[in-house]
Amino acid sequence: MDLELVSFKLCPYAQRVVITLLHRHADFRMTFVDLDDPPAWFVDISPFGKVPLLKVDGTVLFESAVINEFIDEVAAGPPMKPADPLARAVNRAWVEFASACLVDHSDLVAAPEEKAYKRALEGLGEKLDQVEEVLGEGPYFNGAPFSLVDSAFAPLFMRLEILRPLVAVYEPRDLPKVARWSAALLALPAVRESVVSEFREIYIEDVRKRRGVLAATLPT
């Protein structure tokens, strides 16, 4: 099976797919596109004009949650989804919740004025409060096995750790389970290797380019 992932270096949703591919030891190749100036072939095959796309023997899949479930179904090794149908549904719901957290993160980074900035900060903080309530003893969302919920949240935690010197969305002492989960995910090779080597630098530069409230806190 030939797998080609079409991505953008800063996309957290594409990063989810990379994490899943690496965790499942799947063979794939990566093609990066510039979403500000996408090539014609990308426009032709991407229904929403977004990444990630996964080309599977030429067939195009889109939407990270769909792609990750496909990878989990076809890759060798233990599945990342629970066997129980109800537990699988619960996991799918928390993958969607992770997407809502990423929307708050994007709003936080891009907020042009203080009111929008505080709204995004509070919204994301409240969502992490909810996550704290449902987490068990870990180390991952479902306990010992690494799941698609873990690959969905890992990109968020990576970005929050980079932002921590500028803004602490949560304090580890207040959300100890979230903090432990974040640390466990960020220590995994599949997570560390899911971004380009210069990710921190280009992420900070992207924050700066947005010229929002958060960008004003960056050192000149």
Image (spheres, rainbow, N blue to C red):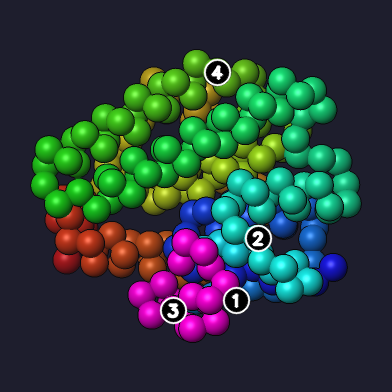
N-term mark: 3 or 1: 1
Give the residue type that dot 4 points to. Val
Q: Is residue 167 above or below residue 124?
A: below
Mark 3 vs mark 1: in front: 3
Q: Residue at x 17, y 55 (%)?
A: 212
Q: Is residue 208 visible?
A: yes
Q: Which residue bears the numbered disc 2?
A: 61
N-term mark: 3 or 2: 3
Look at the numbered disc 4 and give the secondary structure of its residue: helix
Q: Position of residue 3 (x, y in %)?
A: 75, 68
N-term mark: 3 or 4: 3
Identify which residue, 127 or 174, lies in the foreground.
127
Distance of mark 2 from mark 1, alpha carbons?
15 Å
Q: Which residue bears the numbered disc 3?
A: 38
Identify which residue, 201 or 83, lies in the foreground.
83
Q: Which residue bears the numbered disc 4?
A: 134
Q: Quadrant of the C terminus?
A: bottom left
Q: Which residue bears the numbered disc 1?
A: 31
Distance of mark 3 from mark 1, alpha carbons?
12 Å
N-term mark: 4 or 2: 2
Q: Residue at x 40, y 27 (%)?
A: 127
Mark 1 vs mark 4: in front: 1
From the viewer's perspective, tell me whether residue 130 is left or right of residue 170: right
From the viewer's perspective, tell me whether residue 184 is left or right of residue 10: right
Count up the numbered dots. Answer: 4
Q: Which residues are magenta?
A: 34-50
The furthest residue to the top: 133
The furthest residue to the bottom: 40
Distance of mark 3 from mark 2, alpha carbons?
18 Å
Q: Quadrant of the N terminus?
A: bottom right
